[in-house]
Image: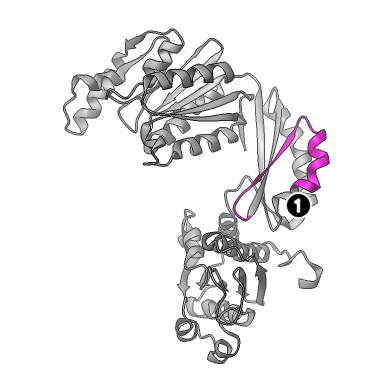
Amino acid sequence: MEVFPLSHKVEILSVGTELLLGSIANTDAQMLSQGLSTLGLNVYWHTVVGDNPQRAREAVAIAKQRADIIITTGGLGPTCDDLTKNVLAEAFGKKLYRDEDSVRRLEEFAKKRGRRLTENNYQQAMLPEGCTVLVNDWGSAPGCAFEAEGVHVIMLPGPPSECRPMFQYRAKPYLLSLSEGVIASHTLKLFGIGESTMEAQLRDQMNTMSNPTLAPYAKEGECELRVTAKAPTDQEAQALLKPTVEEIKALFGAKVYGVDVSSLEEVVEQLLLEKGLTLGVAESCTGGLMAKRLTDVPGASKVFKGGIVSYTNEVKAGVLGVPQELLDQLGAVSSQVAQAMAEGARRVLGCDIALSSTGVAGPDKDDRGNEVGTMFVAIATPEGSYVRTLALGNRPVRERLRIQTASHAFDLARRYLSGLPYSDSKKER
C-alpha cells in the first residue's frame, strides 16, 4: 500500500525523433504510466514529438490547455536538438538561468569520468527560473519542476537508466506535495478468471461506487482490481478501503492470489520460504520460462532447487525417468507424461515440490493431432500428484501460451501451499 496525492489530469510528452522513427521503444512512457497509476494519478494523453522546435511548441501548447500536470522525457542534453527546457520555459513565460549547483555537479560528473566539459555541456545547467531542481545522481542532465498558469511541469531525462530513478526518487516526492488530501489504494491480483467475467460480476457495484472506486485491469493471463479511496488522512482512507477489499476477496475466493503483490511466482516463493520447502521444475513446452520467472524474484536461491528443460522425449525418459511406454503409447502431450515429469523432477532434483509442463505451443498441431493450446501442467508433492488439463485456444501465439501455461503451474503450487483445492470445480477437487 502507498499513499498519494489527489488525482490530476496528466499528459506525458516524450521528446525525441528516435522514438518516432522506431529506433528505440518508448519505455519511459510505459514506466511513467505504470508509476503514475499507482500514485492515483490519471494519465489522459501520451504525446511523442520529434526534435523540432515548432512541433514541440505546438505539442506543449495543446498539453497546457488540457492537462494540469505535464511530464516530459528527453531533450535535456547538451546538443542543439535538446530543446525541451527552452520550449517549456518559452511556453510558460519563464527565463532560463544558470544554476551554479548544477554546474558544480556537471564538473564533478565529468571529472570522475575523466572527461573535459565543452561549452555546450553547460547548457544542461540552464534551468527555468523559480523551478525546483531535480538532482540527477544517475547522469549528467538535471531535471526540474515548476508550476505556472495552474499547470505543474516536470522534466525528466530520456535515458531509461536515468528516467526511472529520477521518477522514483525525485519526481514522486514532488507529486506527493501537490495535495493535502491523500489517495490510498490496494491492488488485488486474480488468476483463473477472465477480465470480462470479472467485470460482469462487479459491474453494478462499480457503477454505484464513488469512494472507494474499483478499476479492473487485464494482464497476460490474469486480472487486477485496484481499489482506491480518497480521504483527508491515510487512516480514514484505509477505513474506506477495508470493507471493499474483504468483499472482493470473499466474492472471488481462491482466485485472489494476493493483495499488493507483484506476481504469482513471488507469492509461491514467499509461501515456500514460510514453510521451509523447496521447489523444482521440469519443462517442455515452456522451454525454461518457469525457471526464468522464478529466478527473477530476489532470494529465489533459498527455495528454488533448479529446473530441467526436457524438450525431447529422450531427455524426458533418460533424465526424468518418464516411462518409455508412456511416451510411445500416449505421446509427450498427455496428462500421464506431465505427471511422470513432475514426479521425476522431484526425485532427480531432491526438492519437496515439483512442477511440470508439456503441450503444443504451435504454430501447428503435434503429430498425434493435439491442437495448439493443448497443455498439461502437473505438481508432485509428498502427498501425491495432480494434473491440470488446459485448452488455451488455437491461436498460434507461442509466447502467450507459454506465459499462461507457466502461470497455471505456479497456481497449482500456490494453491497447494495455501491449503486450497487445486480447482474451483467440485468435479476436479
What's the magenta region?
199-221
Q: Amino acid at mark 1?
A: Thr
- In this view, the residue in front, 424 or 158, is 158
Please tell me in which quadrant of the rendered image residue 38 appears.
top right
- In this view, the residue in front, 23 or 426, is 23
Residue lying at 70% horizontally and 50% vertically, measured from the top left: 195
Q: Secondary structure at mark 1?
A: helix
Does the rendering let one see residue 124?
yes
Would residue 298 appear left or right of 267 to someone viewing this image? left
Give yes or no for residue 362 being in the magenta stretch: no
Give yes or no for residue 212 being in the magenta stretch: yes
- In this view, the residue in front, 47 or 284, is 47
Q: Pinpoint residue 132: horizontal percent, then vertical percent.
A: 43, 16
Does the rendering let one see residue 102?
no
- In this view, the residue in front, 297 or 403, is 403
Height in image: 26 above or below 405? above
Considering the image in quadrants, where does the C terminus appear?
Answer: bottom right
Considering the image in quadrants, where does the N terminus appear?
Answer: top right
Q: Pinpoint residue 348: horizontal percent, then vertical percent.
A: 48, 79
Which residue ends up furthest to the bottom in the rendered image? 325
Would residue 269 appear left or right of 211 to someone viewing this image? left
